Amino acid sequence: MQYDQFIKHVQSFAQLDSREAAETATRAVLETIAERIVGNEAHQLASQLPKQLGDCLNGREGQNGTFFSLREFYERVAQKADVDPIHVPTYCRAVFSVLNSAVTPGEFADVKANFSEDYDELFAPSAQIS
């Protein structure tokens, strides 16, 4: 999936008013994913994304992920994106949904394996992207 398509889908799923807001939300979610998962897994995920998105995930190769709850995940995304926390779950679900369509099923399953059960709402089946 190309960068422009990825951002367009995030904007649509999250019902964001602007492309810039979708880009900000996407970067914030990807950077927080990188903090949460094993660095090598983040690098593998990055390799399946456009460079502009993959850059948000790189730089932690060889490091373990940091455990934090879904609530803290949302707080970190809100801080990075400088948005009202009430909107963050929608942004996160949008990015995870687009990620699911943008990478191979095996890679998405590997990413999911890095998250505890309290994150299940981010991995819920969603509408397919055509």
Image (spheres, rainbow, N blue to C red):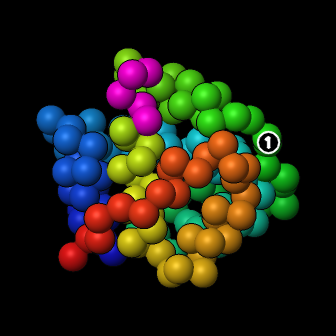
Q: Position of residue 111 (x, y in %)?
A: 64, 64
Q: Quadrant of the C terminus?
A: bottom left
Q: Which residue is mark 1?
A: 66
Q: Which residues are magenta?
A: 85-89
Q: Residue at x 79, y 42 (%)?
A: 66
Return the residue nearer the eye: 89 or 60.
89
Relative horizontal placement of residue 102, taking residue 119 as reference (left or right): left
Q: Position of residue 92 (x, y in %)?
A: 44, 43
Return the residue nearer the eye: 58 or 121.
121
Relative horizontal placement of residue 24, taking residue 109 as reference (left or right): left
Q: Residue at x 48, y 39 (%)?
A: 28
Relative horizontal placement of residue 14, taking residue 125 as reference (left or right): left
Q: Amino acid at mark 1?
A: Thr
Q: Secondary structure at mark 1?
A: loop
Return the residue nearer the eye: 89 or 23.
89
On the question of residue 10 being in view, the answer is yes
